[in-house]
């Protein structure tokens, strides 16, 4: 039996959301239809493709990558700096670093609690 890859399932789900959203009047689309966390996106190109294709009115996207820091990400992937800039500045997509898909619960808890502490420090 052939199984769809997670990437294919995510893209299919997003397409279903796009089809559903287009049938509704714009005033009824106050919140995105899907909340999506991308994991293991490497250079963030899949995350950027999703938000470009469906926009923030249809998806609420959070991107995550394995590299520990932004500097490590851009040193690893030549196009990551531009992709990261467009995600953040053009689409207001949060990007989480140091998220390990093999230890998702553990790494997300650590990253999100660290993010919350940082927000409290700056607020």
Image (cartoon, rainbow, N blue to C red):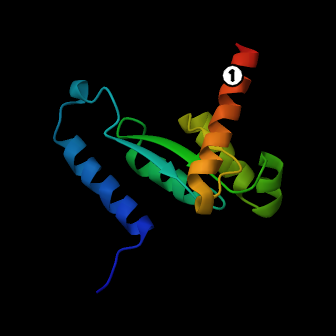
Vertical side of 49 occupied by 119: above or below = above
Q: Quadrant of the C terminus?
A: top right
Residue at (41%, 72%) from the top-left corner? Answer: 5
Label 1: which secondary element: helix
Residue 38, given in percent of the width and then of the height, sits at: 52, 53
Vertical side of 19 occupied by 9: above or below = below
Q: Where is mark 1, residue-wise?
A: 119
Residue 103, given in percent of the width and then of the height, sits at: 61, 58
Rendering quarter of residue 88: top right
**Position of residue 48 in the picture relative to residue 72 (left or right):** left
**Position of residue 59 in the picture relative to residue 123 (left or right):** left
Front residue of 14 and 52: 14
Residue at (38%, 60%) from the top-left corner? Answer: 11
Q: Looking at this rendering, what residue extends furthest in the bottom direction? A: 1
Q: In which quarter of the image is the N terminus?
A: bottom left
Q: Looking at this rendering, what residue extends furthest in the front direction? A: 106
User: Can residue 41 be seen at all in this image of the molecule?
Assistant: no
Residue 116, given in percent of the width and then of the height, sits at: 65, 27
Residue at (69%, 57%) from the top-left corner? Answer: 66
Residue 25, given in percent of the width and then of the height, sits at: 18, 31
């Amino acid at each position: 039996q052939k199984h769809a890859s997670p990437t294919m399932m995510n893209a299919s789900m997003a397409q279903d959301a796009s089809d559903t959203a287009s049938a509704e009047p714009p005033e009824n689309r106050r919140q995105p239809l899907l909340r999506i966390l991308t994991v293991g996106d490497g250079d963030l190109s899949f995350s950027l493709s999703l938000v470009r294709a469906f926009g923030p009115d249809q998806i609420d996207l959070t991107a995550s990558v394995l590299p520990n820091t932004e500097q490590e990400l851009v040193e690893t992937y030549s196009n990551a700096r531009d992709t990261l800039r467009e995600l953040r500045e053009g689409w207001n997509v949060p990007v989480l670093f140091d998220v390990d898909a093999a230890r998702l619960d553990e790494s997300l808890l650590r990253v999100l609690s660290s993010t919350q502490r940082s927000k409290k420090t700056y607020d």
